[in-house]
Amino acid sequence: MGNLLKVLTCTDLEQGPNFFLDFENAQPTESEKEIYNQVNVVLKDAEGILEDLQSYRGAGHEIREAIQHPADEKLQEKAWGAVVPLVGKLKKF
């Protein structure tokens, strides 16, 4: 991290940046460990959320059918059954 800061604050423009950052093998220091663990949990959860978002299909069809046939109780229940789980997902997102 220090190398990156050194390059960003460099005022000697004739000498080009000469640094290597190894992000793949970086390890947190003891003082960074707690934050690293918190961020790691969020990133692991984010993978599942991204998968859910990519497979999200919505309930547009069921909602349209229920709106077009307001007296049909089965369509109303079908729409409600499709919407309720999606609301939980959207809340999580």
Image (cartoon, helix red, strand yellow):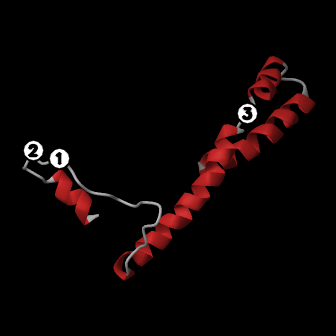
User: Residue 39: x, y in percent?
Assistant: 47, 65
Q: Which residue corresponds to the image point at 47% horizontal and 61% vertical from the top-left? A: 24
State the count of labels.
3
Q: Is residue 9 above or below residue 59?
A: below
Q: Is residue 31 left or right of residue 52?
A: left
Which residue is denoted by mark 1 in the rendering?
A: 16
Of the two numbered discs 1 and 3 in the rendering, the one whose residue sits closer to the viewer: 1
Query: Mark 3 vs mark 2: which is more N-terminal?
Result: 2
User: Residue 62: x, y in percent?
Assistant: 81, 28
In the rendered image, which quarter is residue 61 located in?
Answer: top right
Q: Is residue 35 above or below residue 18?
A: below
Q: Which residue corresponds to the image point at 24% horizontal and 65% vertical from the top-left? A: 2
Name the amino acid, label 2: Leu
Q: Secondary structure at mark 1?
A: loop
Mark 1 closeness class: few <14, some 14–19, many ≥20 residues within 10 Å: few
Q: Secondary structure at mark 2?
A: loop
Name the amino acid, label 1: Gly
Mark 2 closeness class: few <14, some 14–19, many ≥20 residues within 10 Å: few
Mark 1–mark 3 Cα distance, whole angstroms, equals 49 Å
Q: Which residue corresponds to the image point at 42% horizontal and 67% vertical from the top-left? A: 26
Q: Which mark is residue 57?
A: 3
Of the two numbered discs 3 and 2 in the rendering, the one whose residue sits closer to the viewer: 2
In the rendered image, which quarter is residue 74 located in?
Answer: top right
Name the amino acid, label 3: Arg
